[in-house]
Image (spheres, grey):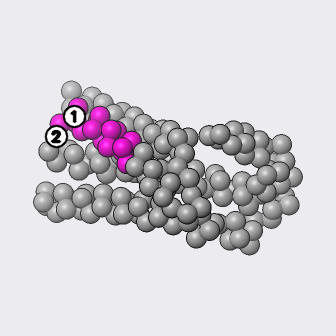
Amino acid sequence: MGRMKRVIDILLLVCILAGLFISSSQPYTKQDLRGTISQYVDEKTVSEKWKNLSFHYGKKEISMDDTGAAGMIEFFLRKGTHFTVFALLTAVLYRVLRHRLSAAAALPWSAFLSLAAAVLDEWHQTFTPDRTGQVADVVLDGLGSGTMLLIIAVGLGLKNRKKK
């Protein structure tokens, strides 16, 4: 069973990394969700409720006036995906590393490797038409990774507490 667990963990890691690479290779026009969102969301209602929503992300102001309701929803979906994917990547990296390393060593290495993947992902996007790499996305990816590390550390602490 242990060998099968390792194989599954490695396959999950490969799938996540392949998904990141494929996603970073696609121009924004292939990933644009605004049309689909417009079909399912009453944009007028969302625009009215979020009319004053405005904030800075990276070097850009994000506002309802600039993006429209579908654009704002898409922004949150895309950024939520960044956070979630890198949290999952960190969890899978941790599992893979735990096959060879202690928890104390696997935690920082999974953080480092996840952050390295985030930097490489954004760098890769700079070669893709209609895409840009953003430091703000690396920071968001790092927050996803850090959140997962915290969840793992708390879980380990609770597990160790139960043993005592």
Q: Could you tell whether 69 is left or right of 104 in the image?
A: right
Q: Is residue 104 visible?
A: yes
- Rendered residue at 55%/63% (across/down): 129
Q: Does residue 112 sit above or below 46 in this rendering?
A: above
Residue 77 in which image quadrant: bottom right
At 50% across and 38% down in the image, what residue appears?
139
Magenta segment, which residues?
102-117
Total marks placed:
2
The residue type indicated by label 2 comes to: Leu
Q: Residues within 10 Å of mark 2 (few under 14, many from 20)?
A: some
What secondary structure is marked by label 1? Answer: helix
Residue 148: image location, x then y, percent: 40, 41
Q: Which secondary structure lies at badge 2?
A: loop
In the picture of the structure, the residue carrying the numbered disc 1 is 105
| Residue position marked by numbered label 2 in the rendering | 101
Question: Please, what is the three-letter code of the amino acid marked with disc 1?
Answer: Ala
Question: Looking at this view, is 127 or 138 the one in front?
Answer: 127
Apparent side of residue 82 relative to residue 87 in the rendered image (left or right): right
